[in-house]
Amino acid sequence: MAVEKGDLVKIEYTAYTKSGEVIDTTDAEKAKKSGIFDPKKRYGAVVVRAGHSELLEGVDEGIIGMKENEPKELEIAPEKAFGKRDEDLVRIIPLRQFKEANINPVPGQVINIDNTPATIRAVNSGRVVVDFNHPLSGVPLRYEVKVLKDAKSLDEKAQLLAEKYEMKADIKASGENVSVDLGANKFDDKRARDSAAVALVARELKEHGAKKLQFKGEWDLTGEDSKEKEDAHEHRH
């Protein structure tokens, strides 16, 4: 069956500019080879709700109608990616304002002005040309996309949501009800994150038609959690 609007899907992708430059990818190795690897980013396939603006508009539209394990190339026009360039968003700011803020502007530098990211385009004659357009505005893109899973049933959606929020649990759906078993574990930071993930999963399951979520689990509080051990180790040293 094909992806429909509202389906929960697991996809992998790589985004390129027309010149072939990789600007984003779910593949860690490809990111490393392309020089865009971010150690703070979580790589791997992503779980999104098709047609609900969780992706660029052109990609969101492009995955509708795709089938599982079907690779597809999408040509994305600027207006359905990061927008067309708006010359009104290119402004000239006196250099002294940067000096007063202890900023030494350099062409190509990205800075934050009034909580808005901006790129320094030029510095000359006491003036700084600042561009508030997105760096990829006006740039057509090419996406290589593959749908790994198209969840149709509530049970399949529950499984994908547990994966999305990295919740370690046995999760099952029966009719309109979902059960989550967190198991019996020593309490630590990971267990606390699992507890928070239950609420996030429940919120999205409600949007997918679930009526009730039952969860259970047991935490052993007698041992030190990882944070306490770390603090104790630092105190001893």
Image (cartoon, helix red, strand yellow):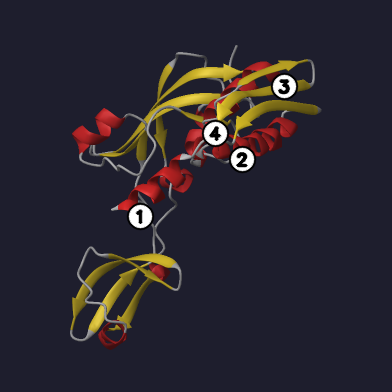
- The residue under the point 74% across, 33% down is 206
Disc number for residue 196? 2
- Where disc 4 sits, the SS reads loop
Q: Secondary structure at mark 1?
A: helix
Q: Secondary structure at mark 2?
A: helix
Question: Which is nearer the N-term, disc 3 or disc 2?
Answer: 3
Would you say 13 lies left or right of 63 here?
left
- At which x and y percent is residue 236? 32, 52
Which residue is identified by label 3?
179
Circle 2 or circle 1, nearest the eye? 1
Above or below residue 202? Residue 122 is below
* Label 2 crowd bin: few (<14), some (14–19), many (20+), radius 10 Å: few
* First reached walking from the N terminus: tag 1 or tag 3: 3
Q: Nearer the viewer, residue 146 or 86?
A: 146
Disc 3 marks a residue whose amino acid type is: Ser
Q: Name the N-terminal-most of marks 4 and 2.
A: 4
Q: CA distance from mark 3 to mark 2?
A: 16 Å
Q: CA distance from mark 1 to mark 3?
A: 42 Å
Q: Position of residue 3 (x, y in %)?
A: 58, 20
- Sequence-wise first label, 4 or 1: 4
The three-letter code of the residue at mark 4 reads Tyr
Task: Name the residue type under label 1.
Answer: His
Q: Which residue is mark 1?
A: 235
Is 233 located above or below residue 91 in the figure? Answer: above
Read off the residue under disc 4.
Answer: 165
